[in-house]
Amino acid sequence: MALLFFFGTECIHCHKMDPFIEKLEKEKKIQFKKIEVWHNERNASLLRSLDNGKCGGVPFFYNEKTKKWICGETSYEELKKFAVE
């Protein structure tokens, strides 16, 4: 199972999620795969294929196990629920 976190290097909203991701990784012993899309066309193409018109930007979280996603910033509790389902 992979938890994907699509972000842009200069994205303020993405960086606001970093502390939540770090806390969750330590607390639940899980790992997010961080994928930069603003400076990598291959990664951006992967984002577009998984997003498929759902969100249209970053931050974008995708859970490969459940096929669920989160668009934009979210709370720690919502991210935790998303990641450990």
Image (cartoon, rainbow, N blue to C red):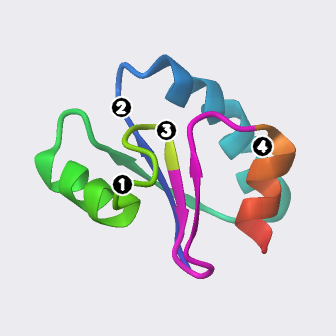
Mark carried by residue 59: 3
Label 3: how many residues lie within 10 Å, few (<14), some (14-19) or many (20+)?
many
Among numbered discs 3 and 4, the one appearing first in the sequence:
4
Element type where label 3 sits in the image: loop
Q: Find out whether residue 73 is within the magenta segment.
A: yes
Q: Quadrant of residue 17?
A: top right
Left or right: 36 in relation to 13: left
Q: Callout 1, which amino acid?
A: Gly
Name the residue rendered at 14%, 55% in the picture.
42
Q: Is residue 81 left or right of residue 13?
A: right
Residue at which label 2 appears: 8
Tell me if mark 1 has few (under 14), some (14-19) or many (20+) residues whose alpha carbon lies within 10 angstroms of its own.
Answer: few
Identify the residue at the far front of this view: 53
Whole-angstrom CA distance, mark 1 to mark 3, is 14 Å
Residue 59 drawn at (x, y percent): 49, 38
Q: Where does label 4 land, which residue?
A: 23
Question: Identity of the amino acid at label 4?
Answer: Lys
- Residue at the image point whose x is 79% and y is 37% from the top: 75
- Residue range in magenta is 61-74
Q: Earlier in the sequence, mark 2 or mark 3?
A: 2
- Name the N-terminal-most of marks 2 and 1: 2
Structural distance between the alpha carbons of marks 1 and 4: 29 Å
80 up-or-down from 65: above or below: above
| Position of residue 15 measured from the top left corner of the image (x, y, whole percent) | 54, 25
Q: Quadrant of the C terminus?
A: bottom right
Q: Does dot 2 land on a helix, a strand or a loop?
A: loop
Q: Which residue is mark 1?
A: 53
- Of circles 4 and 2, the one toward us is 2
